[in-house]
Amino acid sequence: MVYVHKDPTVEAGVMALVLREKRRARSRRDWEKALQSFGYGLARTKHGTFVTTLPHGVEVCRLPGGAAI
């Protein structure tokens, strides 16, 4: 069992990192590789695209609609 605590401060920091790396990336693959180097990944679900932790896949926060893959 994995205990997940949602912390708005952590979510805001992760979102800032994700969006900064998206602006820097030249392609979707570059973006995903950059996120992996920080220990994060992207997961598409029926509820949207989420930033997840690697390797466990715990959802951290949901990407806003304009930032989706």
Image: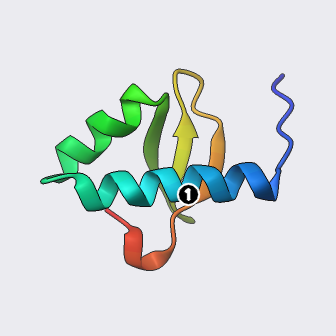
User: Residue 2, percent across and down?
Assistant: 81, 26
Q: Give the vertical position of 48 relative to 28 (above or below).
A: below
**Closer to the camera, 63 or 24?**
24
The C terminus lies in quadrant? bottom left
Within 10 Å of the Cα at label 1, are there few (<14), some (14-19), or many (20+) other Cα atoms?
A: some
Image quarter of the N terminus = top right
Disc 1 residue type? Answer: Met
Residue 4 versus residue 8 in the image, above or below: above
Residue at the farthest bottom position: 66
- x, y percentage for residue 45? 50, 56
Q: Position of residue 20 (x, y in %)?
A: 39, 57
Left or right, residue 11 beside residue 18: right
37 in relation to 51, above or below:
above
Q: Position of residue 60 (x, y in %)?
A: 65, 47
Please identify the quarter of the rendering in which residue 32 is found.
top left
Q: Quadrant of residue 56?
A: top right
Identify which residue is drawn at 66% across, 59% down.
12
| Residue at horizontal 49 percent and vertical 35 percent from the top | 40
Q: What residue would you read off at disc 1?
A: 15
| Rendered residue at 46%/47% (across/down) | 43
